[in-house]
Amino acid sequence: MPTRLTSVVVLALLFTTGLDPLITRPDAPSGIAWADDDDDDDDRRSSPRTRRDDSGLTPFSPRTRQPQRTAPRPRTATPAPAPQPDFAPDEIVTLGLSGDDLALLVVQGFAVIEETDVPGLAATPRRLAPPDGLTLADARDVIRALPTGEDADFNHFYRSEQGFSEDCQGSDCPARRMIDWDIPPDRTSTCGNSVPIGMIDTGINEEHETFAGAHLDVKRLGPDNFDRSRALHGTAVAALLVGDPQTRSPGLVPGTRLVAVDAFYRTDGDERADIFTLLKALGHLADEGVMVINLSLAGPANAVLEESLRRLVFDEDIVVVSAVGNSGPGVDPEYPAGYDAVIAVTAVDRDGAIYRRAVRGAHVDLAAPGVNVWTAASVSGARFKTGTSFAVPFVTAAAALVREARPDLDAVAVGQRLREWATDLGDPGHDDTFGAGLLNISGLCDPTL
């Protein structure tokens, strides 16, 4: 009898406290950079059994508990997700074809799907459909052979470089502490506020409490014929930049103006942005007068993107900062971080160890906190995030500090300044893992340095 009574008490405690021996994520795809990070109640329609709070734990209602089964449920294998495409199957994007070259292509059977003026890039990007019987690669070669078509390329897709949730010991991971970045008492008590920042990302929950009082402008450019992007990744990145210091997700430069463009959309479980939309987003940011651009995204090399970023950095004097990507240390560079004009940022943990999934290579410029970084959840509150995406805002904010303190420095010199002052990690000097080393903000607000 005592043994039976003990069992009853244990079962009652389990039902009352809501403990569950197995929590599964049947909707989580594998092999996608952001797959394991969607633990927020984005649509507010989850039942009490599946809703998660900001701690990452799942509360359960005793009323929904089912009687214990005597035999386990049969489990069916989850099919592997379909491979994600690298580019649109029947489109070539051009940056600035002349009227004569465009007319020649139309005669040859090319069709204009869409075109738009982008004053910020001093260009008119176009999406072109190749004629029947011509492969996409051959169509690109035909356009590149023209005097004004040398930058033509596929309409590549780019994805947010969100990593994977990992446990964090303690309630406050020392991301700020490792680079001596103090939390200001309010939005105005910090330097860097006079430098407008731009970012291209997924949607942002503008109603999140951390954005109350922020100078936040959000514009959506994702195609209307697809599902809108989720307000998960973008909310976390934006909060790292301009989150309210009085909330649980304080920002690095909370008083600055942030111009955010949602260039992403969802199709068949894939959240992505295409080159044509990215071009419009970059042009919009240039038109808005931003001085630093945060790109927490990655994808393939693309000639149109490379030329656009070169114009922004060298002609428009805008600092561009991007994530190296989370595809692992054994892959080729991902882009736009792989381009010389861009400051490429990798992620490290609290001990200065490299994030295990970070891409490596000679193009890496700087390391910044990116493992278990505390920032806003998509609906309310905050949680830990991991990935090279979340290291980028630290360098973006540091670039804003330099631009305010040293307005005489151009965009290239700002990047050089950050590399010179980095704290060396790994092998002495620049290396393929940490670049110049860990971001160091000491003295960045001082115009005499």
Image (cartoon, rainbow, N blue to C red):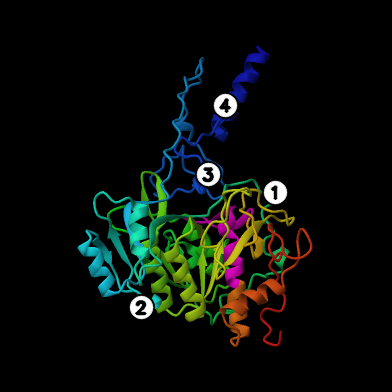
Magenta-tinted stretch: 371-397
Q: Secondary structure at mark 3?
A: helix
Residues at marks 2 and 1, CA–CA distance in whole angstroms:
48 Å
Q: Are marks 4 and 2 in contact (CB under 8 Å)?
A: no
* Residue where numbered disc 1 is placed: 169
Q: Secondary structure at mark 1?
A: loop
Residues at marks 3 and 4, CA–CA distance in whole angstroms:
32 Å
Q: Amino acid at mark 1?
A: Gln
- In the rendered structure, find residue 12 and report the number of the disc placed on it: 4
Q: Amino acid at mark 4?
A: Ala
Residues at marks 1 and 3, CA–CA distance in whole angstroms:
19 Å
**Residue extending furthest toward the right:** 428
Between 371 and 378, the one nearer to me in the picture: 371
| Relative image position of residue 131 (x, y in whole percent) | 24, 54
Mark earlier in primary sequence (3, 4): 4
Q: Secondary structure at mark 2?
A: helix
Which of discs 4 and 2 lies nearer the camera? The answer is 2
| Relative image position of residue 238 (x, y in whole percent) | 50, 65
Crowd tier of the residue under label 2, counting other residues whose Cα lies within 10 Å: few below 14, some 14–19, many 20 or above: few
Q: Secondary structure at mark 4?
A: helix
Q: Amino acid at mark 2?
A: Pro
Mark earlier in primary sequence (1, 3): 3
Q: Is residue 380 above or below residue 117?
A: above
Q: Is residue 181 above or below residue 64?
A: below
Mark earlier in primary sequence (3, 2): 3
Report the side of 224 relative to 188 (left or right): left
Mark earlier in primary sequence (4, 2): 4
Between 140 and 430, the one nearer to me in the picture: 140
Q: Say which residue appears at 41% left-offset and 42% top-offset.
A: 46
* Residue where numbered disc 3 is placed: 36
* Residue 3 visible: yes
